Amino acid sequence: MFVTETSVRVRYSETDKMGFVYHGVYPQYYEIGREEALRYLGVSYKMLEDSGIIMPVITMSLKYIKPVMYDDVLIVRTTVKEMPNVRMKFFYEIFKGDELIHTGQNALVFLDDKTRKPVRVPEWFAKLFEKFFEE
Amino acid sequence: MFVTETSVRVRYSETDKMGFVYHGVYPQYYEIGREEALRYLGVSYKMLEDSGIIMPVITMSLKYIKPVMYDDVLIVRTTVKEMPNVRMKFFYEIFKGDELIHTGQNALVFLDDKTRKPVRVPEWFAKLFEKFFEE
Amino acid sequence: MFVTETSVRVRYSETDKMGFVYHGVYPQYYEIGREEALRYLGVSYKMLEDSGIIMPVITMSLKYIKPVMYDDVLIVRTTVKEMPNVRMKFFYEIFKGDELIHTGQNALVFLDDKTRKPVRVPEWFAKLFEKFFEE
Amino acid sequence: MFVTETSVRVRYSETDKMGFVYHGVYPQYYEIGREEALRYLGVSYKMLEDSGIIMPVITMSLKYIKPVMYDDVLIVRTTVKEMPNVRMKFFYEIFKGDELIHTGQNALVFLDDKTRKPVRVPEWFAKLFEKFFEE
């Protein structure tokens, strides 16, 4: 299992007239979680794209436990529970202080940027995760 | 069962560097689907808010079948399968031409805007859906 | 002079916690204005991009006269006051009913999508505007 | 004169199909600049709103010098050149490394959140800026 945490401060533009963060904004927090998870491993999602691979999201689910407000500082905990293969799944827990206020998950595929066809995870990318899944 | 359809044209601002619609944009299409479903019934979500009720989303799931591009015209089919009660569930199917390119669902609760506490669905609002669920 | 009008309904996602439309959303309304102006001429901005030209914005100014609310239906009046050349300028007036509630303008350049270098306006595109600027 | 700097990393969601940051995103960077300027003074924009004052933007202008890409780290330099009064003006310079890639400015007013009428700048708020404008 591979777990990282990063923080994000809620922007004014992310709120809606309810005063809460708009529910459609959370995928952006997931994205920040994923990016920082990769950066922790010494790479970046940008490096992946520069190498000719894109990773579109194919499924996503979100559970809103407590609302989030403007200027709140959130902790996004991102977890990878299995080796990436043709898909890669990420799990997210978002905390405000010690309180879990949101959970979610999504699955992404690897596509060749030119052909837009599915490919297996690049070997160099898969290798980054190996040590977290050895017994 | 209550089913309505509405159309939406993809905005440039909704695309990302992949050239597809950003995956976090679809909740906005769902929202347009819900709003037009209510308008079909002669009311609006705004009327509900003006009456002191807000409806935050508490769960949502999304399945991306085919990518959507800039300037595409999408049909959003919104379905309500059961009478609203303390929750209200919506199902979405998004089509490009005849092709189903995305499905999703979400559940919303009714909150008193002042107290921010859950309430039952307002009677006038529930009544709108009755005829679609009679045997 | 070339003037067209189109309408846009304010989305919930476009509001912020003030209850107004977030001030950073108006460039999207301008974009809808531009797109519909082109469609009126029988073409589309997408056609331009498909032909290998992109049009990034290089300057923009906005004046917020009255706030705009969720579910408001706005009229975006888009005006082109001079023939496109290396730049193209658009002026926007946004109305709610008869009331002018926002004005703005921006300038865009024509770039070759591959080289990302400035180019002159494509001839077929310039031709579309000729009849509006003849004496 | 009061000048502060803060950094912001470009999000994937902020790009569009050109591969650049969407031009309508920059007002969010300005907002981050303003917020961090206030935090430098030991307060926050949230404190202002909690005290019953909101600050809508009434004019804004933007100049796009060079495009900005996904994952770029930008420096937002925010400058206040005169004491806030009924209005408050902010100037922004955005750098990528040493290179100035964007400039902009906007003006905001102080409104009473309840009445939505203009008010003078709160005294405690104006005081924060005094030392930067003494001769």
Image (cartoon, coloured by chain):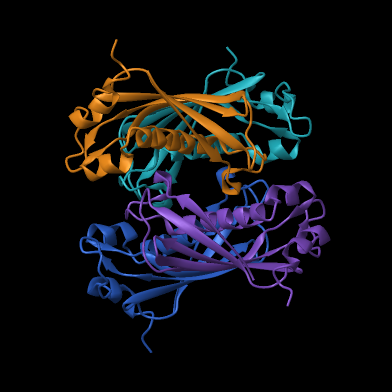
Chain colours: A cyan, B orange, C purple, D blue
Horizontally, residue D97 falls left or right of residue A63, namely right
Q: Quadrant of the N terminus of chain D?
A: bottom left
Expressed as whole percent of the image width and height from the top left, the position of residue A125 reads 69, 28
Q: Quadrant of the C terminus of chain D?
A: bottom left
The residue that appears at 42% across and 74% down in the rendered structure is: D89
Horizontally, residue D15 falls left or right of residue C118, namely left
Question: Which residue ends up furthest to the front in the rendered image?
Answer: C135
Question: Which residue ends up furthest to the top in the rendered image?
Answer: B135
Say if residue B122 shows up in the picture.
no
Relative to C100, is A99 above or below? above
Expressed as whole percent of the image width and height from the top left, the position of residue D48 reads 28, 62
Expressed as whole percent of the image width and height from the top left, the position of residue A134 reads 60, 15
The residue that appears at 28% across and 14% down in the rendered structure is: B134
Horizontally, residue D129 falls left or right of residue B67, namely left
Question: Which residue ends up furthest to the bottom in the rendered image?
Answer: D135
Q: Nearer the viewer, residue B65 or C133?
A: C133
Expressed as whole percent of the image width and height from the top left, the position of residue D39 reads 37, 61
Relative to A5, is C22 above or below? below
The residue that appears at 79% across and 50% down in the rendered structure is: C52
- Picture quadrant of residue C111: bottom right
- Picture quadrant of residue B57: top left
Relative to A87, is D63 above or below? below
Q: Nearer the viewer, residue C10 or B106?
A: C10
Say if residue A118 shows up in the picture.
yes
Q: How many labels were placed on the picture?
A: 0
The residue that appears at 76% across and 35% down in the rendered structure is: A52
